[in-house]
Image (cartoon, helix red, strand yellow):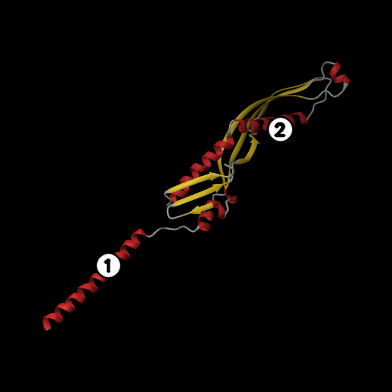
Amino acid sequence: MKNRLTLVFVAIAFLIGLVVALVIALMIVRRDAAPRFAATPSVIVQIQSLSELVTVKYVIEKVVFAEAAKTTTLDQLLPGRDDKLTLLAHGVVKAGVDLSRVKPEDVETSATTIRITVPRAALTDQYLDEKATQVLDRQTGLLRAYDQKLEQQARQEALNEIVRAARVNGILREADERAQQQLKTFLKSLGYQEVEVRTQGK
């Protein structure tokens, strides 16, 4: 009788130990396999802290020939009434993505994956480098008054042409691509293994 009771107690103790060991094992497994979630608002704040991501800068030189308009009959008939200049313009055009416009609905996250839609790239700055921009030649006839606005108009025309050249050569496309690359690197540094960056409207 005593031997049977002893066997029963041993069996019960063994079962209890087995259950405890199983529970501990499950807790360890769950802890190791627990997914890691990132709160979307926190991610958005970190992205927006990058603010305006300027990704591309084009430096372009442009030679502009400008001539003041001949507005009177005398200007057109008489010699010596010309007012011309040649301007060497050194322009800078920058483009980037405004990440402050990223909204909660633009970000999707899971344990190891993040998908984000960002605004399209836009020009962020365009200007002439005054240190490198210079008038190469200026000719004003003896019978013609010096036109002070001609150089200013030539500079504006040069800047317009430089911006147009930057667009034609793909500055916005390149800015989109570089912004995606930089964002992927940044988001992977936060621990995401799979990152997809999309551009609005594409």
Of pointers 2 and 1, the one earlier in the residue sequence: 1
79 relative to 2 in the view: left or right: right
Q: Is residue 136 above or below residue 58?
A: above
Please give the residue where the numbered disc 2 appears in the rendered image. Answer: 156
Where on the picture, by quarter, is residue 34?
A: bottom left
Name the foreground residue: 161 vs 116. Answer: 116
Spatial CA distance of label 2 from label 1 is: 78 Å
55 relative to 19 in the view: left or right: right
Q: Amino acid at mark 2?
A: Gln
x and y percent of residue 181 in the render? Answer: 49, 42
Q: Amino acid at mark 1?
A: Leu
Q: Is residue 24 above or below residue 64?
A: below
Please give the residue where the numbered disc 1 appears in the rendered image. Answer: 22
Where on the picture, by quarter, is residue 56?
A: top right
x and y percent of residue 158 in the render? Answer: 68, 30
Categorize mark 2 by other alpha carbons within 10 Å: few (<14), some (14-19), many (20+). Answer: some
x and y percent of residue 107 in the render? Answer: 53, 52
Q: Is residue 144 above or below residue 168?
A: above
Question: Residue, x 71% and y 30% (percent of image)?
Answer: 157
Question: Residue, x 21% and y 76% (percent of image)?
Answer: 12
76 relative to 46 in the view: left or right: right
